[in-house]
């Protein structure tokens, strides 16, 4: 497979994230519908947190077993474990401080920043200062870090001649990204904020673009520590976002909706993951 064909695979896998973004442009959604969409996004993100962390832990466990069997140094295990712990911490804790700092500089417009209905003609500077956009941005960043690691897997498989595996990875990751795009839009739907297409395009680029970048790098570069670091950063940031979205869900009320939405999101996440499992990952 040529370099151009490998890059095309990465672009397809990452580009499908835009399929879930138009939900944020929907008008007139009832409170119950908005609450359900928020809960479904939490379920999807919870699945991603489990999926990301399990992939990050796998090479650390392999290093532990190799060290225990005397086949590798304990130093390698300690290094990878430290990278994992540092990555999760760096992805989670600083976001809490950042959110507190931004809350002190919050620019409010209209009666209640979290409930304002943002028209399409609103100046972009207003939306960019909106706490709802910041939450969506954090989701996109966390998903982008995750997708970078997915791109590495695609690039490494294709460059190694495993074409069937690479194609199956693209199909699975493409479906994954479609559901992830929906997760990015959840804060807008929950707060009745209607972002412009340019803002959605920016979030889609942040979330899906790293798949393309990872595919480029994965053709010629493979490093366990780097992969673990990006996965750990993604896990930490997604955990922060899940905590924030649960807070939004509790403020909206209707715990039964939250539970049903969580189940729908989890089922959607595992359903798409089964395709990747079939590929032998």
Image (tube, rainbow, N blue to C red):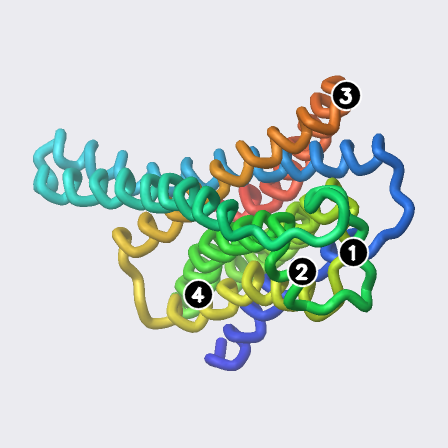
**Which residue is found at the position 70% from the left and 70% from the top?**
198
> In the displayed structure, would residue 128 be above or below residue 246?
below
Q: First in sequence: mark 3 or mark 1?
A: 1
Between the residue at mark 4 and the residue at mark 3, the CA separation in whole angstroms equals 40 Å
**Which residue is found at the position 60% from the left and 54% from the top?**
107
- Give the residue pinned by disc 4: 214
**For discs 3 and 1, the disc positioned in front in the rendered view:** 1
Local packing at callout 2 (Cα closer than 10 Å; few below 14, some 14-19, many 20+) is many
Q: First in sequence: mark 4 or mark 1?
A: 1
User: Does dot 4 land on a helix, a strand or a loop?
Assistant: helix
Q: First in sequence: mark 2 or mark 4?
A: 2
Contact flag, marks 1 and 2 (Cβ < 8 Å)? yes
- Give the residue pinned by disc 1: 118
Local packing at callout 1 (Cα closer than 10 Å; few below 14, some 14-19, many 20+) is many
**For discs 3 and 2, the disc positioned in front in the rendered view:** 2
> In the displayed structure, would residue 108 be above or below residue 8?
above
Q: Nearer the viewer, residue 140 or 221?
A: 140
**Which residue is found at the position 61% from the left and 29% from the top?**
246
- Give the residue pinned by disc 2: 127
**For discs 4 and 1, the disc positioned in front in the rendered view:** 1
């Amino acid at each position: 497979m040529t370099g151009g064909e490998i890059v095309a695979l990465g672009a397809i896998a990452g580009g499908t994230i835009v399929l879930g973004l138009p939900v944020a442009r929907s008008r007139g959604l009832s409170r119950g519908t908005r609450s359900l969409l928020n809960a479904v996004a939490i379920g999807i993100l919870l699945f991603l947190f489990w999926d990301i962390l399990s992939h990050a832990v796998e090479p650390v466990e392999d290093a532990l077993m190799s060290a225990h069997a005397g086949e590798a140094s304990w130093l390698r295990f300690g290094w990878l474990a430290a990278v994992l712990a540092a990555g999760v911490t760096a992805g989670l804790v600083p976001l809490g401080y950042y959110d507190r700092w931004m809350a002190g500089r919050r620019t409010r417009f209209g009666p209640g920043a979290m409930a304002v209905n943002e028209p399409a003609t609103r100046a972009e500077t207003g939306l960019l200062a909106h706490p709802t956009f910041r939450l969506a941005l954090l989701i996109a960043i966390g998903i982008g870090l995750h997708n970078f690691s997915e791109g590495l897997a695609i690039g490494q498989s294709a460059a190694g001649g495993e074409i069937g595996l690479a194609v199956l990875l693209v199909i699975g990751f493409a479906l994954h990204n479609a559901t992830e795009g929906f997760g990015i839009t959840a804060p807008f739907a929950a707060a009745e904020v209607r972002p412009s297409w340019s803002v959605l395009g920016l979030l889609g680029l942040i979330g899906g673009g790293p798949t393309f970048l990872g595919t480029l790098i994965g053709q010629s570069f493979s490093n366990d520590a780097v992969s673990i670091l990006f996965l750990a950063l993604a896990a930490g940031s997604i955990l922060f976002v899940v905590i924030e979205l649960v807070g939004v869900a509790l403020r909206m009320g209707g715990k039964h909706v939250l539970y049903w939405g969580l189940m729908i999101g989890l089922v959607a996440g595992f359903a798409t993951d089964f395709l990747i499992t079939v590929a032998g990952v």
